[in-house]
């Protein structure tokens, strides 16, 4: 079994993520090979909250150009975790 900190790599703090917080939804950067059950357990373990639902999105890397070479950023996965009423994550 994976360690909780290996599954959830971090909280995504963007404008879109901040707009979802009043709805009790939080964005997380997660391991590409993790599933919804592992993500739920990891968030509950790390932040000591109860999750209601987990939605995942696989994000494709973007093409980048540095001088004459063309490269690509790596693919990654994000999760939208909805918390049960009364639970909150302190993002400050």
Image: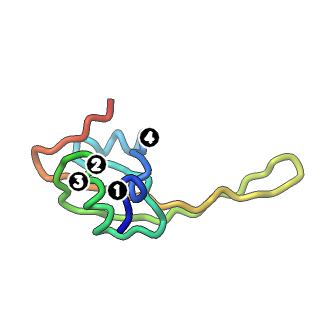
Q: Which residue is mark 1?
A: 4
Report the mark closest to the observer, 4 or 3. Answer: 3
Q: Which mark is residue 14?
A: 4
Disc 3 and disc 2 in contact, CB within 8 angstroms: yes
What is the distance, in whole Å, between disc 4 and disc 3 at their CAs?
22 Å
What is the distance, in whole Å, between disc 4 and disc 1 at their CAs?
23 Å
Q: Which mark is residue 46?
A: 2
Nearest to N terminus: mark 4 or mark 1: 1
**Callout 4 secondary element:** loop
What is the distance, in whole Å, between disc 1 and disc 2 at their CAs?
7 Å
Residue 79 location, x and y as percent? Answer: 37, 58
**Callout 2 secondary element:** helix
Density class for disc 4 (Cα within 10 Å; few <14, some 14-19, many ≥20) is few
What is the distance, in whole Å, between disc 2 and disc 4 at their CAs?
20 Å
Closer to us: 49 or 1: 1
Density class for disc 3 (Cα within 10 Å; few <14, some 14-19, many ≥20) is some
Q: Residue 80 falls in which quadrant of the image? A: bottom left
């Amino acid at each position: 079994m994976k360690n909780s900190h290996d599954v959830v790599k971090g909280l995504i703090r963007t404008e879109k993520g901040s707009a979802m917080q009043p709805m009790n939804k939080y964005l997380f950067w997660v391991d590409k090979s993790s599933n919804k059950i592992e993500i739920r357990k990891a968030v509950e373990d790390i932040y000591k909250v109860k999750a209601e639902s987990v939605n995942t999105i696989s994000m494709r890397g973007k093409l980048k150009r540095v001088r004459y070479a063309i490269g690509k950023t790596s693919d990654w996965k994000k999760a939208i975790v909805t918390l049960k009423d009364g639970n909150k994550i302190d993002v400050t």
